[in-house]
Image (tube, rainbow, N blue to C red):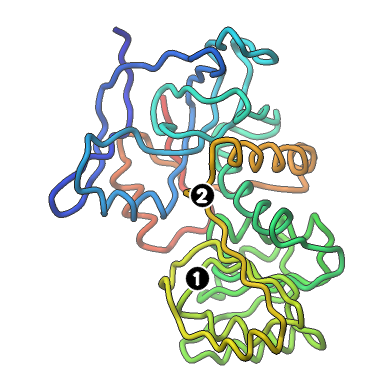
């Protein structure tokens, strides 16, 4: 049996942890492609899930990767050995991964492996939030909070690509906002602890307010978020870095005719997830190839340093995706 190195999520009585193990190399089913992984990436949600892992057998971590096609299943057409690809599928933090062929897109030549691995998950998530669910229209005002998160940086760029009139971005760090300005921010706003940033966002979005808000923070700012929204504004809840709940004035919600939209891949079917992937590829692969969109890599760690990569993410110092290099 052929073996490979992989990051294994290990369950424990008080929460799970990660370790690199030798595990059997997968073989593609008829509709799948076997990919030799050169780079994968980590996401904050994965770390939180591992900490809550208390039972079961565990499994290989990761959902995004870049690498080369090794073998295609009997029912697959369009992919052949040696093709450089990037994709989305479980078990990506490993030397090899098998995925449905519809979860692959060609890697632009201008991207290195780390950049390619940094693109897939956050741009799919942001595209689904802003275009498919948020219905972003040219000329509208967009607010992206937690702007230095992976989804935040993707959302800023998609807003610019889609022709948003103003792109307001918030962060607790002025230094991070300065670094993100070239991505397409028109109005940077530093968040303080007492909600004074709301007035700055109102001024930046006057006279209408924010038409589309991509919310990666959640409960701790939900009350403030609603105050900056335009009539018929759409708030798309992507992440909950600031908690799962907060005060909600339903009368204010009704008077402003606001739309609160929740998105996640956790409750989607395989077909629905593939549809999201293909919609992203349809719209964004061409601007990615032209350099209009740019995956941002913060730091690259060897696969064996997965625990250190997790600690770096939890320290909140990064600006961009944290990548695992698979040799």
Q: Position of residue 140 (x, y in %)?
A: 82, 70
Q: Position of residue 63 (x, y in %)?
A: 47, 38
**Left or right for 74, reference 28:** right
Q: Nearer the viewer, residue 135 or 173?
A: 135
Secondary structure, mark 1, is loop
Secondary structure, mark 2, is strand
Q: Quadrant of residue 117?
A: top right
Q: Nearer the viewer, residue 181 or 162?
A: 162
At a point 63% along the width and 54% down the height, the residue shown is 126
Residue 37 sits above or below residue 194 on the image: above
* Disc on res. 58: none
Residue 214 sits above or below residue 38 on the image: below
Residue 110 sits above or below residue 312 on the image: above
**Left or right for 207, reference 28:** right
**Left or right for 22, reference 302:** left
Neighbour tally class for label 2: few under 14, some 14-19, many 20 plus, Cα within 10 Å = many
Q: Position of residue 30 (x, y in %)?
A: 54, 12
Query: Which residue position holds label 2?
Result: 321
> Disc 1 and disc 2: Cα gap in Å?
18 Å
At a point 48% along the width and 20% down the height, the residue shown is 36
At a point 66% along the width and 29% down the height, the residue shown is 105
Quarter of the rendering occupied by the N terminus:
top left
Q: Nearer the viewer, mark 1 or mark 2?
A: 1
* Disc on res. 217: 1
At a point 72% along the width and 41% down the height, the residue shown is 279
Q: Position of residue 239 (x, y in %)?
A: 50, 63
Quarter of the rendering occupied by the C terminus:
top left
């Amino acid at each position: 049996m052929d073996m490979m190195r992989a990051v294994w999520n290990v369950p424990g009585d008080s929460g799970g942890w990660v370790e690199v193990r030798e595990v059997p190399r997968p073989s593609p089913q008829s509709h799948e492609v076997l990919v030799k992984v050169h780079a994968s990436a980590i996401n904050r949600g994965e770390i939180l899930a591992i900490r809550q892992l208390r039972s079961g057998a565990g499994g290989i971590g990761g959902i995004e990767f870049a690498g080369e096609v090794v073998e295609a299943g009997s029912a697959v057409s369009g992919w052949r050995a040696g093709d450089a690809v990037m994709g989305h599928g479980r078990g990506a933090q490993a030397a090899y991964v098998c995925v449905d062929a519809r979860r692959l897109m060609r890697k632009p030549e201008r991207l290195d492996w780390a950049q390619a691995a940094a693109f897939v998950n956050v741009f799919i998530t942001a595209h689904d939030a802003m275009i498919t669910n948020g219905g972003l229209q040219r000329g509208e005002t967009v607010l992206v909070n937690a702007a230095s998160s992976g989804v935040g940086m993707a959302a800023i760029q998609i807003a610019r690509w889609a022709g948003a009139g103003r792109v307001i971005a918030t962060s607790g760090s002025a230094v991070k906002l300065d670094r993100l300005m070239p991505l397409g921010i028109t109005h940077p706003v530093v968040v303080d602890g007492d909600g004074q940033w709301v007035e700055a966002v109102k001024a930046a979005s006057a006279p209408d307010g924010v038409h589309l808000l991509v919310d990666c923070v959640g409960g701790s700012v939900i009350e403030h978020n609603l105050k900056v929204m335009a009539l018929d504004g759409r708030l798309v809840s992507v992440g909950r870095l600031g908690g799962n709940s907060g005060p909600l004035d339903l009368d204010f919600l009704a008077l402003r005719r606001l739309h609160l939209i929740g998105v996640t891949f956790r409750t989607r079917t395989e077909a629905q997830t593939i549809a999201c992937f293909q919609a992203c590829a349809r719209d964004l692969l061409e601007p990615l190839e032209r350099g209009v969109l740019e995956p941002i890599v913060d730091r690259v760690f060897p696969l064996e340093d997965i625990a250190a990569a997790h600690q770096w993410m939890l320290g909140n110092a990064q600006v961009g995706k944290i990548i695992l290099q698979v040799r």
